[in-house]
Amino acid sequence: MNAFSRRGACPALSAPMQTGDGLLVRLNPVDGGPSSGGLSPKLLIGIAESALRHGNGIMEVTARGSLQIRGLTTESAALLAAEIDALGIAVRTGVPVETGPLAGIDPQEIADPRPLAERIRVAIDEAGLTQRLGPKVSVIVDGGGQLTLDAVTADMRLVAVSTDAGIRWRVSVAGDGRNARLLAVADEGVARDIAVAALRMIAEKGREAHARDLSERQLVSLAGWLCLTNLREAPPSVLPDISPSRGEIGSFDAGFSLATPEIGETVGDHVISPLEGEMSGRTEGGASRKPIGLFPLAGDVSNLGIGLPYGSMPADKIIAVAKSALSVGTTEIRLAPGRAMLFLGQPSAANQPLQDTATALGFVTSPADPRTRIAACPGTPACASGRIATRDIAETIAAENTDILHFTLHISGCAKGCAHPGPAALTIVGGENGAGLVVNATAKALPAGYRPGYDAARGFGRVAAMIRSARHQGETAAACLTRLGTAGIAETYQQE
């Protein structure tokens, strides 16, 4: 298997990855305005024009906020890379240490996460971890505010909290804002040291390892760091000695727990708030708003979030909306987790005309748009691995079931589940037997029932009708699905 076809790799600009519709490249521009490498409308237009010349004309913004260009060949990928390099766009490299799309400019954030993120990046480089960690190992530093990173999974997540003692950071491992395992609540220096120590442990397990592979003993050791330092910065010389077999920190205070805190539970001086979103009656993402609509910034300024349906749009439409943004004075376009773009710098009066243009082009401009609840990969005919026309199915379902789509629906062309690796309330997945329906699991799970791929939307329509008739007053659609059970849902989906 060559470098272009290895699954699980990150398809960076310098190392494209083979997919069903050709090579895929991914880039992460640095935010902060054109002078620091952020995307201006002109730069986004340049990237999109290059994508039209060298790819199949499809561009994507991923769930993590990365920009992807599809349908490349070995030769055209090299030409694309050269043209993007000539544009002078600064892109993130190395181990991803991610901050939110409004980091440092959101008046509602608890703390600016960028200084801590930079300290972690420097520590990773100084420790020589970049080449030792796998391409999908990541760190999140979340300062809170209007657009948090609760829905994004990471190996290490550091989240700002306000306490009586000042700003502290909740350090957790292996998960998203709902299910990551809490290690400690610490000041910035200790939080950084715990994160880097954990990354060292992961690196020692090999390039295929993630935080979920750390042993209970190692997690206890990391949590014990807090007691060792008593909220003081640990000596840098201690860091190299943290490993599975040596230099481990002893047991921590009996009053400290490694268990994930429950809603309402106090951790340090911080009370854990309920998370919004749902999947089969449970939380599924985080308390952050969707990155669509207006977001107030300092003073009388706001920025506009516009979503890509299912994370994908033709490059010519991206060019059109970027040209509109340029004409109204937009100075920067930031990519946002949740498959969206944020338009900054334009006068407030320009937001509505820009939003109207985006709506006419087919972008998602309302957070209530049912397409925000559907994760759909390219499917057929764009992807050779796909067995069903995912986007056609998604569009039909979204148009006909706006009242029901209050849970995540995953429509996957094959069992790889690229668009939504985690479990969803319902998943329609393409396979040899047609369009299978998976209930409360991932696309890799065995479907509970099948129907022809061309007829999948009608099958979902039958399930939607069942929800409408069976739902109790005040009951969510997701909770109703849970109560109805897998067998009943599958039987209804398969009915002629």
Image (spheres, helix red, strand yellow):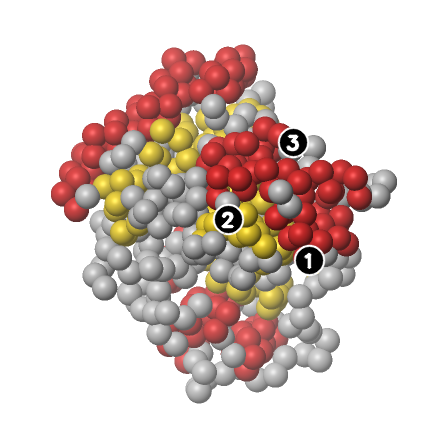
In which quadrant is the N terminus drawn? Answer: bottom left
Earlier along the polypeptide chain: callout 1 or callout 3?
3
Query: Disc 3 versus disc 2: distance between alpha carbons?
Result: 21 Å
Q: Secondary structure at mark 3?
A: loop
Number of numbered tags placed on the structure image = 3
Q: Position of residue 151 (x, y in %)?
A: 57, 49
Above-or-below relation of 338 to 326: below
Can you identify the residue that label 3 sits on? 402
The residue nearer to you, when weighing 474 against 460, is: 460
- Residue 256 occupies which quadrant of the picture? bottom right
Residue visible at 27% across and 40% down in the picture: 71
Q: Position of residue 360 (x, y in %)?
A: 48, 17
Residue visible at 52% across and 36% down in the picture: 394
Q: Position of residue 140 (x, y in %)?
A: 49, 54
Above-or-below relation of 14 to 186: above
Above-or-below relation of 128 to 35: below
Can you identify the residue that label 1 sits on? 487
Can you identify the residue that label 2 sits on? 435
- Label 2 is placed on what type of residue? Ala
Q: Please state if 362 lies on the left or on the right of 33 as rendered.
A: right
In which quadrant is the C terminus drawn? Answer: top right
